[in-house]
Image: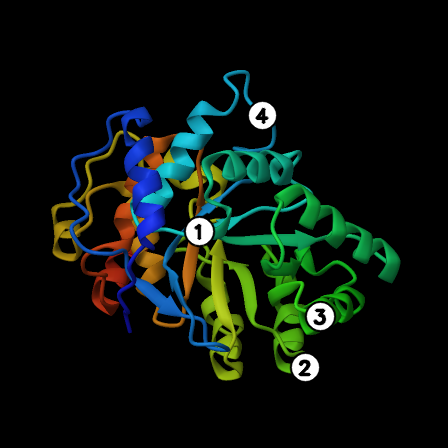
Amino acid sequence: MRHESKLPRRTVLKVAVAGALLPALPATVFAAPMATRRIPGSGESLPVIGLGTSDEFERMPDDGGAALKAVLKTLVEKGGTLIDTAPGYGDAEQVLGRLLDDLGLLDEVFLSSKVRTRGRNEGRQSLERSTRRLRKEPLDLMMVHSLVDADTQLDNLERWKDEGRVRYIGITTSRSSGFEQMESLIRSRELDFIQVNYSALEPEAALRVIPAARDRGVAVMINRAFMNGRYFSLVRGRELPDWAAGFDCESWAQLALKYILGHPDVTCVLAATSNPRHMADNAGAGYGRLPDDGDRTRIERLLAEL
């Protein structure tokens, strides 16, 4: 089910002032708010398209981050709020915190980061560093990265949540080899979110992991929407099929993202980019109709034949 959301007036004003700095964007008209879905544990609405920062935000560019700032402005302009990062993504936390602070957008975005270390004290130190680097407290979401020392770090995160230093907690994996452990933790721990790999080329999470999250009232965030670029290598140079227009799809990127959002138990999906035009294109998947079951089967078959 979709729910409309409106940007706070102060955000609209900030983006309007910054608009002149943006490069030309695709011609898609974003007349309505981006679709949102509810976080089961709280009922809070979250826009369905988010920004990933792995690779793309790992160092401050020589231009001082002008292009990355344009990406962040574009995300907010198109109705998005979710940004995902991690201490393991180079300097992405520091870069992101600085750019959002410069833009005055820290209070307007939903920031997700992670902890990937072993040991109770080491985990707490990692959480403290993330808070300082991202310049935001409470953090919106902290997750155990790749299930490393999951029980110990979830104990830390639960304490932080009780203390009001983080709003939501969860776990992540980007490999099918982690699905069994993830499903076990979904069923045994009190989680708000999981982040998991799922796409038309990697549909296995839909068999057990995503249903377990649905049954336990856990939000589902998707990573590897483009399989680290492999998807684009398959479709490069090919014409988008005419039938994609039936679910308001204008690009190959939107085809991949809309396939994922066609699953009713997915809350949101991440797509990493350092290009504001690509950010605008990705955001377009959060508008208009979504593929039905027949369309999604057609997408799977199309990609299987490439």
- What residue is pinned by disc 3? 163
Residue kind at label 4, given as amino acid type: Met
Is 165 drawn above or below residue 134 in the view shown? below
Is label 1 in a helix, a strand or a loop? helix
Residue kind at label 1, given as amino acid type: Glu
Q: Is residue 154 left or right of residue 83?
A: right
Q: Position of residue 165 (x, y in %)?
A: 67, 63
Verify CB contact (< 8 Å) between mark 1 and mark 2: no
Visible in this render: residue 15?
yes
- If the image is split into quadrants, where does the C terminus sit? top left
Q: Is residue 93 left or right of residue 293?
A: right
- In 3D space, how far apart are the residues under numbered discs 3 and 4 (Cα atoms)? 33 Å
Q: Residue at image x 17%, y 57%?
A: 247
Q: Nearer the viewer, mark 3 or mark 4?
A: 3
- If the image is split into quadrants, where does the N terminus sit? bottom left
Visible in this render: residue 282?
no
Q: Nearer the viewer, mark 4 or mark 2?
A: 4
If you read the primary sequence from the N terminus, does the residue marked by circle 4 or circle 1 appear first?
4
Question: Which mark, residue 188?
Answer: 2
Q: Residues within 10 Å of mark 2 (few under 14, many from 20)?
A: few
Q: Residues within 10 Å of mark 4 (few under 14, many from 20)?
A: some
